[in-house]
């Protein structure tokens, strides 16, 4: 009897322990607050990283994201479905903040606009006076474009293509990286000043429209031309406008994608793509604060090539690489309205069939 009694008690205790574990496990899972956001596609690998997910879960958060272009996020995405928006530029974020009546924004990381190219191209442009070291002079580049210069006409060029000297960009009508390129080139075309009037916008649009029109077809996301740069090489894409983070992430991964003949240039002036989170509720505000203030998230973001509020994190990874940690000539983009006016003018007058 005693043995049977002991066995029954043990069975009850074991069953109780299993039930308790299941209940506690379910309770632990239910304690995670789901926070849904819409982000620029270039940040998707970061949010998909298991370490990033685990870091959020330590703070009781499960962050789920959809992707869209920054201009779409600001203009056409139904933000009522989300707890936060996370575009790749301040102008888009400021419009969202105003439209949604948000009270705060967070800019946890940023990336300067850069040019991915190749050593023979750098050598040719250096001889032409357009490149000095790792810097591409935007004004001198615009002069070459205005003259209709072709690669095989440049002195000392070993790139013998009968193509115009043009940076490859994404479609300015849909992509933030192209809009940031428009911001820096319109600044130079406007006499080294941010466009801030209808007259300045019209003149700048006329001056820079060939930069986009003469390219022909353009991709809608920055990943596409960068992948062409990596896979196809100089023949198709001698120079492509990218986020520095794209190039840096592949360097830091040491996966062989960045080969010895590849180079990264920094336009002068350049523009920072400031990834700015706009929260619509308290949990989303916690997400923004963690991304901005928690050292663990700064270290994880740096692995994906993003610069953070702590410059040393990026600098440590950038040692012994061609990445610069000292950006000098950085200008601000136009306001959202003026940037949209520039894009609309280029589309209406020059890009429509």
Image: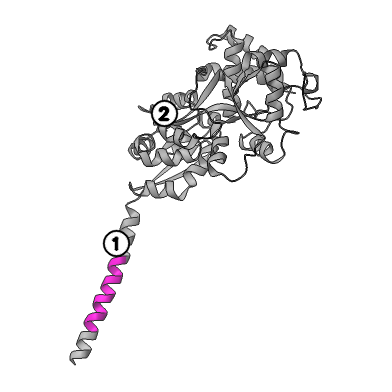
* C-alpha span from label 2 to label 1: 38 Å
In the visual, does 319 lie left or right of 173? left
Q: Which residues are magenta?
A: 8-21
Q: Residue at x 51, y 32 (%)?
A: 73
Dividing the picture into quadrants, the one containing residue 184 is: top right
In the rendered image, the vertical position of residue 197 relative to residue 34, given as above or below = above
* Image location (x, y in percent) of residue 345: 64, 16
Indicate whether 256 appears above or below 129. Answer: below
The residue lying at 76 percent from left, 17 percent from top is 149
Which mark identifies residue 161? Answer: none
User: Looking at the image, can residue 166 be seen?
Assistant: no
Badge 2 is on which residue? 100
Spot occupied by residue 280 in the image (x, y as percentages of width and height): 38, 34
| Colour mode of the rendering | one colour
**Residue situated in front as seen by the camera: 97 or 295:** 295
Q: Does dot 2 land on a helix, a strand or a loop?
A: helix
| In this view, 127 is above or below 226 | above
Q: Which residue is mark 1?
A: 24
Indicate the position of residue 225 as horizontal and vertical percent values: 66, 35
Which residue is farthest bottom? 1
Mark 2 packing: few (<14 Cα in 10 Å), some, or many (20+)?
A: some
Overall secondary structure of the magenta section: helix
Residue at far front of view: 320
Disc 1 secondary structure class: helix
Q: Quadrant of residue 278?
A: top left
Pick the quarter of the image with the N terminus.
Answer: bottom left
Front label number (2 vs 1): 1
Residue for point 35% across, 56% down = 29
Question: Mark 2 or mark 1: which comes first in sequence?
Answer: 1
């Amino acid at each position: 009897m005693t043995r049977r009694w002991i066995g029954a008690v043990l069975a009850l205790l074991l069953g109780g322990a299993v039930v308790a574990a299941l209940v506690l496990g379910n309770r632990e899972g239910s304690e995670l607050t789901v926070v849904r956001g819409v982000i620029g596609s270039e940040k998707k690998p970061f949010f998909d990283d298991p370490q990033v997910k685990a870091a959020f879960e330590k703070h009781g958060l499960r962050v789920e994201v959809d992707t869209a272009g920054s201009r779409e996020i600001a203009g056409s995405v139904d933000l009522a479905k989300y707890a936060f928006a996370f575009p790749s530029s301040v102008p888009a974020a400021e419009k969202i903040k105003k439209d949604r009546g948000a009270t705060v924004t967070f800019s946890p990381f940023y990336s300067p606009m850069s040019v991915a190219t190749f050593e023979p191209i750098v050598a040719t442009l250096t001889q032409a006076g357009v490149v000095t070291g790792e810097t591409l002079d935007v004004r001198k580049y615009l002069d070459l474009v205005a003259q209709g210069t072709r690669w095989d006409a440049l002195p000392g060029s070993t790139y013998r293509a009968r193509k115009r000297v043009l940076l490859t960009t994404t479609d300015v009508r849909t992509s933030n990286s192209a809009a940031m390129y428009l911001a820096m080139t319109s600044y130079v075309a406007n006499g080294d000043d941010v466009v801030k009037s209808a007259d300045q916008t019209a003149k700048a649009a006329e001056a820079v429209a060939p930069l986009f029109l003469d390219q022909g077809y353009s991709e809608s996301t920055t990943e596409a031309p960068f992948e062409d740069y990596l896979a196809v090489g100089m023949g198709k894409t001698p120079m492509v406008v990218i986020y520095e983070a794209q190039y840096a992430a592949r360097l830091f991964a040491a996966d062989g994608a960045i080969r010895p003949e590849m180079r990264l240039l920094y336009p002068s002036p350049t523009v920072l793509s400031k990834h700015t989170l706009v929260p619509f509720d308290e949990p989303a505000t916690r997400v923004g604060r963690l991304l901005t203030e928690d050292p663990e998230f700064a270290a994880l973001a740096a692995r994906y090539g993003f610069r953070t509020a702590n410059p040393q994190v990026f600098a440590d990874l950038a040692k012994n690489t061609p990445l610069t940690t000292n950006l000098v000539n950085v200008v601000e983009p136009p306001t959202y309205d003026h940037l949209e006016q520039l894009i609309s003018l280029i589309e209406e007058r020059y890009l429509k069939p």
